[in-house]
Image (tube, rainbow, N blue to C red):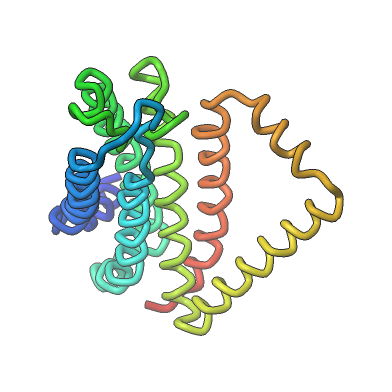
Amino acid sequence: MSRLLASARLHLVNPLVMLGIPWLVAGISFAINLALFALLDRGPDDDGFTGGVASLYITVLVVFVQAVTQLLPFAMGMSLSRRTFYLGTALVALAQALHYGVVLATLIAIEGATSGWGVDLAFWGPGPLDVDGFAAQVLVSGGPMLAFTFVGIGIGVVMKRWGQLGLWGLIVGTVVALGALAILVTWLEAWGDLGTWFGDRSLITVAAALPAALALVLAGLSWGGLRRTVP
C-alpha cells in the first residue's frame, strides 16, 4: 500500500501541472466567453450555450498522456513496478475525476444562482448537462472526466510502447473505425433508433454510467499495453 501511495504521489510532485494547467486553460476560456457574452447583444431566446468547458476535459487528457510518458521511466528508476505505477496512476485518475466533478458541480450551482454570471452564460454546465441535485451533478460532470483521464492514460501507453508510429496508427485506426461505424449505421438506417435509444436512457446513464464503462475497458487495455512497455 505504501508503494501504491508513493506511485500516486509522483503525479502530485508538480501540482501546478497536474491541477493548475487544466484550470488555467479552462479559466482563460471562461473569461473569454464571459467577456463575449457581456458584449454581445443577444436575443431573449438565446440559451447561452457554450462548449468552452470542453477545454478542461481535453487539457486533463493531455496531462495524463504526459503523466504516463514522463513519469513511467522515473517510477521504474525508483524500483516501482509497472503494476504499482499503473495502479497509482489509476488511483489519481479516480481522485481527479471526483475532484473535477465536485468543483464543476459547485461552479454550476453558482452559475445557476447568478443567472449565468449576470450575462446568462451556461459555461460550466451547458445545456442538458445541468441537472438538479448536487450529487447527480457530480456524477454527470465527473463521469466524462473519468473517461477522458483513461483515454489520456491509454494514449500515453501507446506513445510509450510504440512511439509516434503507434500514435499515428491509433489516430488512423480510430478514424477508420468511427467512419466504418457511421457508414454501417447509415446503411442500416438506424440513426433514428440510435437517437431513440439514447433518448430513452437517463442522463446519469449516458453521462456517468457509460463513460465509467468506457473507462473500465480502457483501463484493461492500457494495463495490457503497459505491462510490456520498456521505459
What residue do we see at 57% from left, 41% from top? 213
Return the x and y of residue 215 as percentages of the image width and height.
51, 46
Q: 35 above or below 18?
A: above
Specify the quadrant that holds the C terminus: bottom left
Side (left or right) of 38 relative to 142: left
Side (left or right) of 94 relative to 26: right
The answer to whether any part of residue 9 appears in the image is no
Return the x and y of residue 104 as percentages of the image width and height.
28, 33
Side (left or right) of 198 relative to 225: right
Report which quarter residue 77 is drawn in: bottom left
What residue do we see at 47% from left, 66% from top? 226
State the residue in front, 38 or 150: 38
Specify the quadrant that holds the N terminus: top left
Q: 140 above or below 172?
A: above
What residue do we see at 13% from left, 55% from top? 16
Tell me how many marks there are.
0
Q: 1 above or below 101?
A: below
Q: 223 above or below 136?
A: below
Return the x and y of residue 191 as percentages of the image width and height.
75, 44
